[in-house]
Image (cartoon, rainbow, N blue to C red):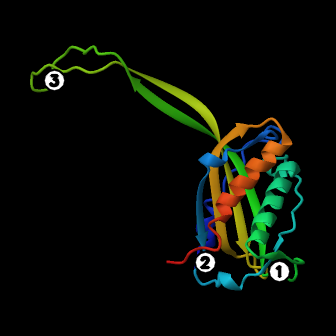
Amino acid sequence: MVSNERLRSRTPLTLILGATLAGFVFGCSTVSVDNDYDPAVDFGNLKTFAWIEKQSTDEAPTIADNTLLSDRIERSVNAVLEAKGLSQAPRGEADFLISQHIGVQQKLQVDTTQYGYGYGFGYGAWGGPIGGFPSQTTVSQYEQGTLVIDFVRPENKNLIWRGTGQSRVRKTTSPQEREKLIREAVTKILNQFPPKKK
C-alpha cells in the first residue's frame, strides 16, 4: 500500500501569489509526468467521481486561490475522466474524490560553454604540459510549475492514486490559449490512469 507520508512529501510548495501567475500555464510539450498508486485498489471498479469540498483559509492568497486556473483544471479533469467512461456523482455517492494541488518554484539553470581553440599553459603533476579550452558559465533563473491530481477514498481521504506533472511555466496571451494548454497538460497526466499494474 502507498505510504501517505511518502506521497505527502512529494506535494509541491506553493511559493508565488496566484495573482502573479494569472497569465502563466504549463507548456504541454515539456510536461514531465509521473504517478503513484495503491496496488491493492481495483481501479476497474471505480466508475464515479466527485471533487473534495474546497476548504476556506485565512492565510494570504496563493496560486491555489486563483479560481480561474483551478476551474480550468477542474473542467479539464472532468472532461478527460468522462471520455474514459467515468461520470460525476454527488460527493456522498462517488467511488472516489479528487483534489488538485498547484505550485510554482524558482529554479536555477547553470550552463557552461567552451569556446575557441587556444590552450592554457602549465605543467601537470607528472611534469607534462596541460591545457584546455576557455569556457564561460552562465546562470539563469526560471519558474517550474507543478500540478498534482489526487484521487482519494471518500470514507477516510486516503490516497489511492496520484498523478504529477512538472514543466517550466510560460506566459500566455489569452484565456483560450490557457484553457488549451491546461487541457493538454491534464490529459498527459491522466493518460497514466488507470495505472497499468506490473
Say left or right for 177 vs 8.
Answer: right
- Contact (CB < 8 A) between labels 3 and 2? no
- Contact (CB < 8 A) between labels 3 and 1? no
On residue 124, the disc is 3
- Of mark 1 and mark 2, the one earlier in the sequence is 2
Q: Quadrant of residue 33?
A: bottom right
Say left or right for 150 vs 38.
Answer: right
Q: Position of residue 82 (x, y in %)?
A: 79, 71
Residue type at numbered disc 1: Ala
What residue occupies the far left of the structure in this picture? 127
Q: Secondary structure at mark 3?
A: loop
Q: Secondary structure at mark 2?
A: loop
Q: Residues within 10 Å of mark 3 (few under 14, many from 20)?
A: few
* Residue drawn where x is 37% and y is 19% of the image: 115
Q: Closest to the observer: 113 or 17?
A: 113
The residue under label 1 is: 94
Quadrant including the N terminus:
bottom right
- Of mark 3 and mark 1, the one earlier in the sequence is 1
